[in-house]
Image (tube, helix red, strand yellow):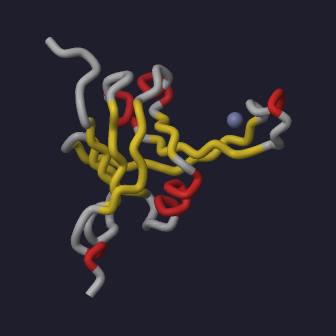
Amino acid sequence: MNPSFFFPMLLYRTRVSPKTPRDGKLEVSPRAAEQLAAMPAPLAIVVNGERGTASVTTMECTCRKGEGGDRHVHSFLQSELLKRLPVESEVTVERAGGGDAVLVSSAWRARSD
Ligand SMILES: [Zn+2]
C-alpha cells in the first residue's frame, strides 16, 4: 500500500513574491513543476480552501548571466486564485491525497493585526 495515495505530499514551500498578486504566478522548483505537470490537466487547485484551476508555466531566462550560468528555466504554478495570496506569506504547495488536486496553503500571514 502506498501511503502517498492517501496523504497530501509536500511538493514545495515558498514565500509569496510581490509579483504574485499581479500575475498569479507562484515560482516553484523544476522538480515540483515536473510533478505538477504530470497531474491531469486542467490542474485542479485549492488555495486556502477555494477551488479553481491552475496551469504550470515555464519561462526561459538569463538572470544568472553575470554569474557565468547558462540559460535556464523558471517554473511557475499559475492561477487566478493565487493573486489573493498575501505577499511575503509563506505557503506550502502539496499534492492532494489521490493526486487529483494541488493544495496551496498559507502557513502564516505577513502582518499580524
Ligand atoms: Zn533566471
Horizontal side of residue 59 vs 50, given as left or right: right
Q: Which residue is at the far front?
A: 67
Q: Is residue 41 above or below residue 80?
A: below
Q: What residue sits 45% from the left and 32% below the top?
A: 24
Horizontal side of residue 101 vs 57, given as left or right: left
Q: Which quadrant of the figure contains the C terminus?
A: top left
How many marks on residues?
0
The image shows residue 74 at horizontal and vertical percentages of 63, 42
The image shows residue 8 at horizontal and vertical percentages of 27, 62
The image shows residue 25 at horizontal and vertical percentages of 49, 35
Q: What residue sits 26% from the left and 67% below the top?
A: 97
Looking at the rendering, the quadrant in which ligand 1 lies is: top right
Q: Which quadrant of the figure contains the N terminus?
A: bottom left
Q: Which residue is at the far left?
A: 113
Q: What residue sits 33% from the left and 54% below the top?
A: 94
Nearest the camera: 55 or 103?
A: 103
Q: Is residue 21 above or below residue 9?
A: above
The image shows residue 56 at horizontal and vertical percentages of 52, 50
Q: Which residue is at the far bottom?
A: 1
Where residue 70 sits, quadrant-wise, is top right
Q: Is residue 36 above or below residue 92?
A: below
Q: What residue sits 47% from the left and 37% below the top?
A: 26
